[in-house]
Image: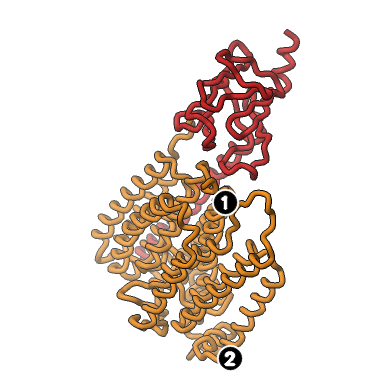
Amino acid sequence: MAEQLLSKVLTFFFVLIIYLFIFVIIRMIYMDIRIMYKKKTGNMADAYLKLINLRRNLDFYVDESYEISDSEIIGRGKKCDIRIADSYLSAKNSRIFKHSGKFYIEDLDSTNGTYLNGEPLGDMAVELLDGDKISLGRSNFLFVLPKSTSDSKRNK
Amino acid sequence: MNKKTLDIRPLLLLFLLNALGIVVLIINKNEASQDLAVLSSIMCVVSIIAYVIIAKLKLGDPYLFIIVSMLSSVGIIMVSQLNSEAGKKQLIWYIVGVAAFFGALWVYRVLNKRLKKLTLIYYMGAVVLFTATLLFGTRIHGAKNWLFGVQPSEFIRIIYVMCLASVFFEPKSKGKKKLSKSAKWKKLFVSAFIAGTCALFLLLQKELGTLLVFGVVYLVYLYVYGDSKPFLVLNILAVVGAALFAVTVFSHVQERVIGWRDPLGTYENEGYQISLALMAVASGGFGGRGIGNSLPGNLYALESDSIFVVICEELGLMGGFAVLMLYFVLVYRGFKIALSTTNPFNKAVSVGLSVAIGIQTFIIVGGITNLIPLTGITLPFISAGGSSMVSTFMIVGMLQAISSMKGETSDELE
């Protein structure tokens, strides 16, 4: 009789563990979705890149938007911060970085180049402004600086 | 820029569950509890290694494997306390299953570009396996579905999904948006032919549960990819007609329906299995009788098809729901993978595989609780049985492979 009771109590904990497990998994999934949602709306970062092309016209995977923090290397290679599997991109194609509150873009000697508002970049890094169009390989991005940052810049 | 650290909480809970299970088995004086303790520690080590490999090599979805491990652990503990030998075997099958998981993952990733063109090979493979089962198979409990100790239909399920996916998926064609009418109808008739042949073989083998899974997978494909409402309605009518025909003509189908409509009234004959199952579930109540305290009597196929009854009796309604929720999360991840992948063939395959796992769970759980007529089929990952374990692990391995290829070039370039 005692044994039966003991096994009943342990069974209770057994079921409890399964529920805890489900809770943990669902919480992990929920956090994942939240991070993805933030990425989509771009609320987190100082600036972000927004894809202009229709995604279904591209035969490789691109996110709708990418956050830009201090320094992001864009390319096809494994070491890039923003990795796009476009065969027209070089392994390390271009870099966007922040220097004393302003964002700059530079080309990393890529084969097909980096285009800012339709013009190819030279050796020098160029400052990025809100609404600039950046073309890398076959995808086109809009550079977006959220309101607060671009306003303060204008006041200076 | 991988900011995510490895989350080990689910692993810890998995170990805790296994440890608790072993303690319960020792309390119940299970004669093989020592062997089982050793084996289940091996299982824990295997699951850590697999979990870390998936996380470190960035093989996509981190949840699939751990959910499947949880389901298997619950299954192993429930099976071991009924039959310790079967439990030991099940643990070994789990380890083989993990190997099959990574095998399927690797093969699918490597062959991904070719897999979509092999419709004929899949079809031939399925027909050959079915014919071999019919010719050389052994008949166990009414269904002739065993071939040299394995159940081929479990593996044909995978081939069948791949075959239908390769017919149905639409390659991205630029410019031409819609398929021409003749191509569309060709697609529909080819798929109907494939599904029809497989259904015929399964009917000959008297494997009603698997037949139901195949049928539902086909209808889901028609619904998602068929692009033709009349054809879908026609098919649903055909399935309903075939079911009515089967009920009136085949005695073994008739038995199931009689048992389903009035299990207690036909307790002596057709309703025997379901009556026992219902009484067992009822005696479990809300909190269950406790692991090892079930009185299942003469319930047939206790460790395999009817394992859910034992779960309900020993873990209670709460335990039954917990297990169903695990399946729910698993199938949800499957559909999530289908939605997020960009390669059309991979999308089609992941839809089919997720539906196959989900509907299989529904059929056996619904059957055993008398929601639908009872048909014998295994409960994925929990039922004792090597073929079921290994083949379902392969399915999950394929889903994992698809989720791991999300960020890579889809193969429409060539």
Using the rendered image of the protein, determine whether residue A126 is visible from the camera's viewpoint: yes
> Which sits in the foreground, B79 or A141?
A141
Q: Amino acid at mark 2?
A: Thr
> Which sits in the foreground, B252 or B1?
B1
Give a yes or no on whether discs 1 and 2 share a subunit: yes
Tell me which residue sits at (63%, 62%) in the image.
B225
Under circle 2, the secondary element is: helix
Tell me which residue sits at (52%, 54%) in the image.
B346
Q: Earlier in the sequence, mark 1 or mark 2?
A: 2
Mark 1 sits on what residue?
B336
Crowdedness near tag 2: few (<14), some (14–19) or many (≥20) residues, C-alpha within 10 Å: few
> Which sits in the foreground, B376 or B146?
B146
Instruction: Identify the chain of the residue marked 2, using the numbered disc in the image.
Output: B
Q: Is residue B112 above or below residue B372?
A: above
Where does the image place residue B393, in percent across and percent down from the top left? Answer: 41, 59
Where does the image place residue B283, in percent across and percent down from the top left? Answer: 49, 73
Tell me which residue sits at (53%, 60%) in the image.
B354
Colour applied to chain A: red
Mark 2 sits on what residue?
B248
Q: Is residue A126 above or below residue A20?
A: above
Tell me which residue sits at (41%, 59%) in the image.
B394
Q: Amino acid at mark 1?
A: Lys
> Which sits in the foreground, B79 or A107?
A107
Query: In terms of image quadrants, where is residue B221?
Result: bottom right
Label number found at residue B31: none
Which chain is orange in the picture?
A: B
Under circle 1, the secondary element is: helix
Where does the image place residue B212, in percent across and percent down from the top left? Answer: 54, 74
Q: In the displayed structure, does residue B131 sit left or right of residue A130?
A: left
Where does the image place residue B282, in percent across and percent down from the top left? Answer: 52, 73
Given contact means CB atoms under 8 Å apart, are the residues at marks 1 and 2 in contact? no
Q: CA distance from mark 1 to mark 2?
A: 41 Å
